[in-house]
Amino acid sequence: MPAIEILGLEKTYHVGFWRKQAKRALHPLQLTVAEGEIFGFLGPNGAGKTTTIKMLMGLVFPSGGTARVLGGSISDPAVRAQVGFLPEQPYFYDYLTARELLEYYGQLSGIPGQERRQKVKAMLERVGLGEAGNVQLRKFSKGMLQRVGIAQAILHDPKIVIFDEPMSGLDPMGRREVRDLIEQLKQEGKTVFFSTHILSDAEALCDRVAILHQGQLRGVGAVAELTANVQGKIELIWSGTTAPAALKAISAELHVSGDTVRAVLAEDRQESALDILKQSGLRLISLTPVRSSLEDYFVSQVGPDKISAGAGS
């Protein structure tokens, strides 16, 4: 049984002064997430990622289609109890301490008193806030608040965890800790579905990813499968400080560093580039294949104009 089944889910908003103009945020989406996998949901700003997640969580009503979680409806309280959720911009009451906040969420989840206190203590340690449990949230940094949000999402030991931008506001060490935590959740048999704008994290973590652009699914599959369809590149390095103009004509990216020149170009132009170097009397030092990355595939699907500081969110 799939952990999450999205069956033609779509959303159209009505905007404008009289709300007469229809704006489609999500075209009919078909997507399946298997139990026990880490699934990345990627796309630039406005792609429809958060809208999809909000519909899965019952926070936004779909215009059409449906979704099933663990074989049941997300509106079923028994299903909701098996899902942990961290929104993109969580809001917590500032004057509660981290411990009080988790105690509150533990009560909402029906965790008995003694067990709840033990779980709260263990969870604070798990997200790196063991020493800050009695500090009011108004004194927390953005990264610390994000950790609290992750803690409340997994406190009740759900089968499925849905994170919307879990790396948001974290420094490199914090991101590494969250990645480790997500991998631990998978080892515990949980399904993790998360959106992110940090492609390197998705590439390192995910069993499969989906690319969403302008409300439409552009690609889904394992990272290795998706990047295999992207045209490969090669890197040439030769001695000297000059580059033949003919290399620029075949779209080579040229970089001069000290007494060597490096060129990166499409794999199918390798023979042409080697002929140019030979004719120019330049000594080749190395020729190396460049592995296609998730970013290469992402750009091929949404266009380089959508890539900003980390690839869009």
Image (cartoon, rainbow, N blue to C red):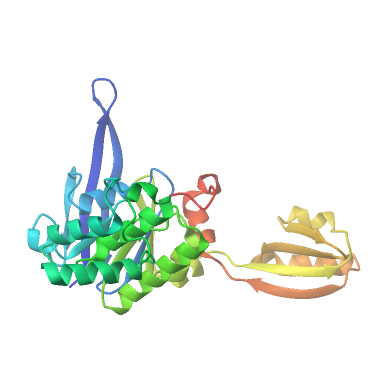
Residue 73 position in % (x across, y down): 11, 58
Residue 252 position in % (x across, y down): 72, 58
Q: Is residue 168 visible?
A: no
Residue 199 position in % (x across, y down): 48, 60
* Residue 20 sits above or below residue 303 on the image: above
Q: Among all residues in the image, which is located at the extreme front?
A: 134
Residue 86, picture quadrant = bottom left
Report whether 245 appears left or right of 62: right
Q: Which one is in front, 295 or 139?
A: 139
In the image, what residue occupies the spot 35% across and 46% down? 138
In the image, what residue occupies the spot 29% across and 54% down? 97
Residue 244, picture quadrant = bottom right
* Residue 74 sits above or below residue 235 on the image: above
* Residue 208 sits above or below residue 219 on the image: below
Q: Which one is in front, 63 or 196?
A: 196
Q: Among all residues in the image, which is located at the extreme top?
A: 17
Report the label total: 0
Q: Looking at the figure, which quarter contains the N terminus?
A: bottom left
In the image, what residue occupies the spot 19% across and 45% down? 62
Q: Which one is in front, 224 or 93?
A: 93
In the image, what residue occupies the spot 13% across and 63% down? 81
Report whether 113 appears left or right of 295: left
Q: Is residue 71 visible?
A: yes
Residue 27 position in % (x across, y down): 29, 46
Q: Among all residues in the image, which is located at the extreme right?
A: 281
